[in-house]
């Protein structure tokens, strides 16, 4: 209904109702007093409520008409698609009445989901770029690699800062909505900057590699690297068997399946090398280069996996050597603290340190008993000993002792961090943002421990202990992600997973982030696998897809 029609309707209502409005009481009395030749009529006193019924009805009707007109016009202007259309207030973009509305903002939960995806993508892009850059380092001089090295360092620093902001959002201190939005938007900005810097170098990096013309040469190098990895896998199996015999299962748990994982990567590399040969023989070096890149990445991850097994063995040996001294120091502190079990001194850091002392005593007794049996996890025993010694120092109000436990604490933290980082690198196709965030925080804490070791040993010790806890949590979360991820082994193969890519180890390559699903959603679904390459999210899928192997 238009404004003109509404006005006409209102006028009609008033015109029809006006003759029915009763006269005012004063007019009625005056009329009764006028002389007429007749007997004066008896005039009943008007009812005050009845006199108002019709006027109120008319006013109410007019209000309904006006409200209907306003609502319909507002709805029409809000949904208008004609450019330049005017309206009221915000619906007209500020061209009419009222205060213009702000444009709709992204809901915090939607913004949070965007940042989670952006962090995972940016972290994967940095990891892939680092790995591919390492492949060409031996074949190129430092000057040629400098722009790409600088791009990777910049991107890595931006992603590290973004994870720091994510950790701030995840900690126990709540932020208001405005602060939360600002942090989320800063995460997006940093992830975008990291990806843009890598994307800007992608074309130049391809020229450096000259994949198509040098496919035969790079294939030969990849094939040679593949053959050299068979021996280390066998050594890793032997090492794991020795660790299981000497230590309890917990000692080798973080690397217990790394030999099998390395073998899976080599199976995939073997198949992709074979496909690369077929493409070259068919005169298609462009497709051959895709398979060469996949083989390079798989061989690199196999080397990482077998290397972590040997490093774990070395760390257990080192912890074995550190434990006697650390245990003796902690037991000495316990002897000093035992009198406090009877009479805690005034001014102690804790109002009642006795509970702390008792817990430390129990932990040291467990470690000593395990050592005496000869079968124990040295890294776990060293970690518990350091924690007990630190608790005793706090109970005594001591500054760090002459033989500081910082060295052993850094050893156990470094071991946990290396294990978690290797797991993340070789399962990044499934690992989520929480695991990556805790890993980044573990790395930050361990770096702080190293920086403060010479000047603030007590703070350095606290950071090292926190680094170990964050690293352990990161690996636990990543393992949960992998278990939830499912089985992408049938990708590109038969529906029952008995042939095709599943048998070729492609499922492991997808979980490892070597290849990406066609949709890039990381859930293992799709009809093909795209080889990940140097670059940000805008370019890392540029090499093309693998056909079923």
Image (cartoon, grey):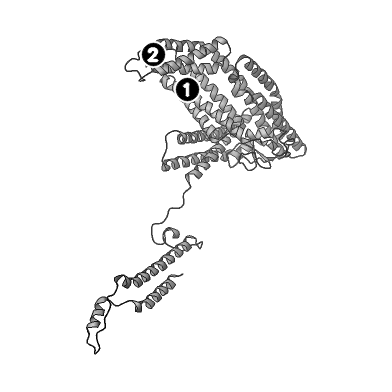
Tally of numbered discs:
2
Disc nearer the start of the sequence (1/2): 2
Is disc 2 placed on a helix, strand or loop? helix
Residue 256 falls left or right of residue 337 = right
Q: Secondary structure at mark 1?
A: helix
Q: Is residue 390 above or below residue 116?
A: above
Q: Could you say where residue 264 lies in the image, as x and y percent from the top left?
A: 69, 29
Q: Residue furthest bottom?
A: 37
Q: Position of residue 228 (x, y in %)?
A: 70, 23
Asked whether residue 175 appears in the rendered view, the answer is yes
Q: Are marks 1 and 2 in contact (CB under 8 Å)?
A: no
Picture coordinates of residue 434, whole percent (x, y): 53, 34
Q: Disc 1 or disc 2, which is closer to the eye?
A: 2
Q: Residue at x 56, y 32 (%)?
A: 149
The quadrant in which residue 223 appears is: top right
The residue at the point 24 percent across, 87 percent down is: 39
Any mark on residue 222, and which?
none
In the displayed orientation, state which residue is furthest to the right: 281
Is 296 on the left or on the right of 190, as rendered? right
> What is the x, y in percent for residue 439?
52, 29
* Position of the C terminus by quadrant: top right
In this orientation, which residue lies closer to the viewer: 409 or 397?
397
Q: Can I make out residue 214 in this image? A: no
Compared to 125, does 312 lie above or below? above
300 in relation to 540, above or below: above
Residue 431 or residue 374, whichever sits in front: 374
Residue appearing at x 48%, y 16% in the figure:
363
Real-space Cα distance between discs 1 and 2?
Answer: 26 Å
Check residue 341 in the rendering and tell me which mark sits there, or answer none: 2
Who's the residue at 70% across and 27% down the image?
226
The residue wearing badge 1 is 465
Q: Is residue 29 left or right of residue 266?
A: left
């Amino acid at each position: 209904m238009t404004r003109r029609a509404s006005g006409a309707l209102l006028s009609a209502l008033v015109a029809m109702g006006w003759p029915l409005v009763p006269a005012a009481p004063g007019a009625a009395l005056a009329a009764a007093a006028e002389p007429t030749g007749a007997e004066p009529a008896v005039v009943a006193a008007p009812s005050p409520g009845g006199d108002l019924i019709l006027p109120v009805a008319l006013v109410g009707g007019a209000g309904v008409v006006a409200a209907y007109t306003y609502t319909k016009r507002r709805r029409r202007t809000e949904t208008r698609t004609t450019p330049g259309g005017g309206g009221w207030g915000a619906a007209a973009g500020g061209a009419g009445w009222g205060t213009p509305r702000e444009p709709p903002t992204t809901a915090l939960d939607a913004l949070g989901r965007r940042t989670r995806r952006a962090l995972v993508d940016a972290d994967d892009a940095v990891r892939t770029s680092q790995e591919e850059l390492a492949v060409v380092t031996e074949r190129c001089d430092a000057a040629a690699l400098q722009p790409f090295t600088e791009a990777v360092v910049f991107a890595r620093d931006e992603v590290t800062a973004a994870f720091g902001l994510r950790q701030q959002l995840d900690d126990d201190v709540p932020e208001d909505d405005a602060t939360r939005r600002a942090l989320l938007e800063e995460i997006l900005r940093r992830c975008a900057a990291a990806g843009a810097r890598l994307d800007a170098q992608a074309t130049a990096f391809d020229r450096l590699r000259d994949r198509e013309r040098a496919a035969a040469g790079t294939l030969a190098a990849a094939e040679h690297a593949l053959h050299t990895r068979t021996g280390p896998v066998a050594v890793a199996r032997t090492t794991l068997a020795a660790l299981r015999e000497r230590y309890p299962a917990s000692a080798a748990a973080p690397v217990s399946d790394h030999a099998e994982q390395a073998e899976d990567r080599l199976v995939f590399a073997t198949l992709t090398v074979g496909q690369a040969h077929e493409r070259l023989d068919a005169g298609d070096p462009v497709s051959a280069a895709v398979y060469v890149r996949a083989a390079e990445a798989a061989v690199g991850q196999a080397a990482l996996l077998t290397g972590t097994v040997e490093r774990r063995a070395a760390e257990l040996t080192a912890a074995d050597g550190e434990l006697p001294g650390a245990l003796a120091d902690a037991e000495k502190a316990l002897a000093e603290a035992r009198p406090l079990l009877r009479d805690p001194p005034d001014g102690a850091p804790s109002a009642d340190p006795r509970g702390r002392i008792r817990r430390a005593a129990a932990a040291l007794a467990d470690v000593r008993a395990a050592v005496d049996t000869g079968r124990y996890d040295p890294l776990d025993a060293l970690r518990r000993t350091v924690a007990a010694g630190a608790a005793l120092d706090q109970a005594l109000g001591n500054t760090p002792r002459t033989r500081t436990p910082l060295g052993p604490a850094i050893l156990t933290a470094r071991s946990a961090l290396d294990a978690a980082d290797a797991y993340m690198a070789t399962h990044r196709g499934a690992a989520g943002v929480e695991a990556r965030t805790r890993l980044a925080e573990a790395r930050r804490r361990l770096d702080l421990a190293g920086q403060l070791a010479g000047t603030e040993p007590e703070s350095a010790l606290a950071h090292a202990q926190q680094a170990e806890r964050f690293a352990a949590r990161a690996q636990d979360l990543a393992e949960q992600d992998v278990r939830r991820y499912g089985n992408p082994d049938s990708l590109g193969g038969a529906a029952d997973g008995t042939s095709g890519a599943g048998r070729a180890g492609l499922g492991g390559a997808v979980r490892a982030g070597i290849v990406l699903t066609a949709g890039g959603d990381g859930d293992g679904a799709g009809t093909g696998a795209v080889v990940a390459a140097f670059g940000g999210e805008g370019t890392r899928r540029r090499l093309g897809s693998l056909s079923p192997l």
